[in-house]
Amino acid sequence: MTVVVKIGGARAVDPEGALADVASLVEDGEDVVLTHGGSTAVDETLEDLGQEPTYVETPGGVVGRFTDEDTMDVFKMVMPGKLNTDLVESLQNEGVNAVGLSGTDGKLLEGKRKSAVRAKVDGKKKILRGDHSGKIESVNADLLETMLEGEYTPVVSVPMLGAEKGGGYTAVNADADRAAAAIAGALGADLVVLTDVSGIYEDPDDESTKIESAATPEEFEAVKDAAEGFMTKKVMAAEEALEGGASSVIVATANADAPISSALEGEGTTLEPGALADDETDAEATQEATQ
């Protein structure tokens, strides 16, 4: 079994239990790829440098970071520099032979650079240029599989390698949840997304309304309807992971004893491949409805 684990970058997420759990899984012979976020650390570093983090809302209502050139420099410094190195250091102290990688290494995470984004500014749609972002279109699964076969544990961070229209590449920002999703899909792995809540709630303010699982398109629609705020992107990433070939996606808390093992045993919210609507079935249903 291969498990891709994504540790969130929120201040409320404590990675200590997850790292110890990675060590236990590796000792038991499981293949683990660890990925991580770090937006909070990036924002804090920007503020320390006297820069203001910039977030924009797309016409579709999704809020994301606008990454200009200066922000990208900080992003490269914090994500693959400090945070990735700290996690590798901690895993080495747990007895795990971890290797840090960014998405630019070996063309691990690759796609087209998006240099302009559409956003709503003061109620008006505008195009903001100078962005350094992209959507991952390919994963070098061979690189990760070679490392796993050599008994190394990859620790992966964005940025990704963004292909420029005129040729060449630029390191650009990419959503960490969607990066983990792309990796899990490419490896056909289980994806465990660790965050600061115990799963996806029907009522975001009430933990007792946690959705245990979704195995049908109808159940997955309920999950999407329930997701709000930061959870919206995690559900989008879960859908991409399942579409890409992931075995399952579990959203669970990082702040628990053995959080990865617990998630794989049913804690959190488990999303199964059957939760995706079958396009062919949908088309047939639509055709029947119109006859």
Image (spheres, rainbow, N blue to C red):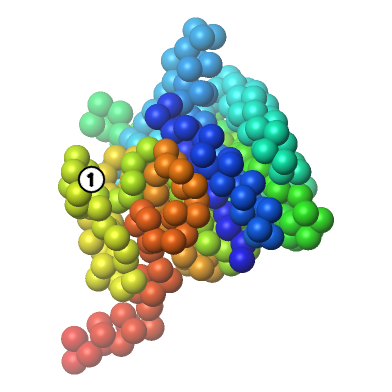
151 left or right, relative to 276: right
Quadrant assignment, res 266: bottom left
- Where residue 7 sits in the image (x, y, percent)? 51, 41
Quadrant assignment, res 148: bottom right
Q: Classify the position of the C terminus by image quarter.
A: bottom left
Quadrant assignment, res 285: bottom left
- Where residue 161 sits in the image (x, y, percent)? 67, 43
Q: Secondary structure at mark 1?
A: helix
Residue 7 drawn above or below residue 25:
above
Q: Residue furthest right?
A: 150
What's under tag 1, amino acid-wise? Glu
257 left or right, relative to 100: left
Residue 173 appears in the picture as rendered = yes
- Where residue 270 sits in the image (x, y, percent)? 38, 61
Q: Residue at x 44, y 15 (%)?
A: 52
Viewer-closest of 93 and 10: 93
197 left or right, relative to 20: left
Q: Residue at x 62, y 39 (%)?
A: 157
Residue 185 appears in the picture as rendered = no
Q: Classify the position of the N terminus by image quarter.
A: bottom right
Q: Residue at x 32, y 64 (%)?
A: 213
Q: Which residue is mark 1?
A: 207
Residue 221 drawn above or below residue 55:
below
Residue 86 drawn above or below residue 114:
above
Residue 187 drawn above or below residue 56:
below
139 left or right, relative to 244: right
Q: How many discs mark residues in the rendered view? A: 1
Q: Residue at x 47, y 65 (%)?
A: 248
- Where residue 42 sits in the image (x, y, percent)? 52, 23
